Image (cartoon, grey):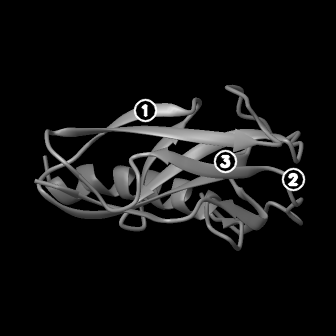
């Protein structure tokens, strides 16, 4: 089977997820664009507790620990969003690597220097307005 034909559904799925997580909130799975509507603000803050910025680590995984204040992690994805409920997205070097339902997770790494940030998003996986982002944490893996 043609590899391009296999890759197309995967690419469409990735673009759909990234579109849903984009600041504009416009998703186009098929047909005309559907707008998620005005995004609520959230009282929540998210912070990366581990790894600490400037850390030098070894191994093939990094244990990430977050602190969420003013918000609650929910496992259900829904369009009936509340400003104090949602999920956590982790970004490494500005690439979405995880849509997590908890405050601790291991991520796979290779030797190099990385930038990690977390975002508390609404229960529909789209961002709040303004976005609820952690400070960026820089770390190196040897």
Instruction: Categorize mark 2 by other alpha carbons within 10 Å: few (<14), some (14-19), many (20+).
Output: few
Separation of residues labelled 3 and 2 (CA atoms) = 17 Å
Q: Can residue 123 be seen here?
A: no
Choose mark 1 or mark 3, whichever is in front.
Answer: 1
Residue pictured at 60% horizontal, 59% vertical: 134
Q: Earlier in the sequence, mark 3 or mark 2?
A: 2
The disc placed on residue 43 is: 2
Secondary-structure class at tag 2: loop
Residue 125 has which mark?
3
Q: Position of residue 38 (x, y in %)?
A: 89, 66
Q: Quadrant of residue 66?
A: top right
| Image x and y of residue 101, in percent | 59, 31
Along the viewing direction, whichever of 68 and 16 lies nearer the viewer: 68
Q: Secondary structure at mark 1?
A: strand
Left or right placement of residue 42 versus residue 134 in this view: right
In the image, is residue 72 above or below residue 24? above
* Label 1 CA crowd tier, 10 Å (few <14, some 14–19, many 20+): some
Instruction: Quadrant for residue 19, please give it.
Output: bottom right
Between the residue at mark 1 and the residue at mark 3, the CA separation in whole angstroms equals 18 Å
């Amino acid at each position: 089977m043609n590899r391009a034909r296999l890759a197309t559904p995967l690419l469409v799925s990735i673009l759909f997820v990234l579109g849903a997580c984009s600041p504009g909130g416009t998703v186009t799975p098929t047909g005309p664009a559907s707008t998620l509507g005005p995004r609520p603000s959230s009282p929540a803050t998210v912070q990366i507790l581990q790894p600490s910025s400037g850390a030098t680590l070894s191994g093939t995984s990094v244990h990430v620990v977050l602190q969420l204040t003013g918000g609650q992690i929910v496992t259900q994805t829904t369009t009936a969003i509340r400003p104090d409920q949602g999920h956590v997205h982790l970004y490494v070097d500005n690439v979405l690597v995880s849509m997590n339902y908890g405050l601790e997770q291991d991520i796979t790494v290779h030797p190099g220097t990385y930038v990690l940030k977390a975002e508390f998003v609404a229960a529909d996986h789209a961002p709040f307005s303004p976005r609820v982002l952690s400070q960026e944490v820089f770390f190196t893996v040897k």
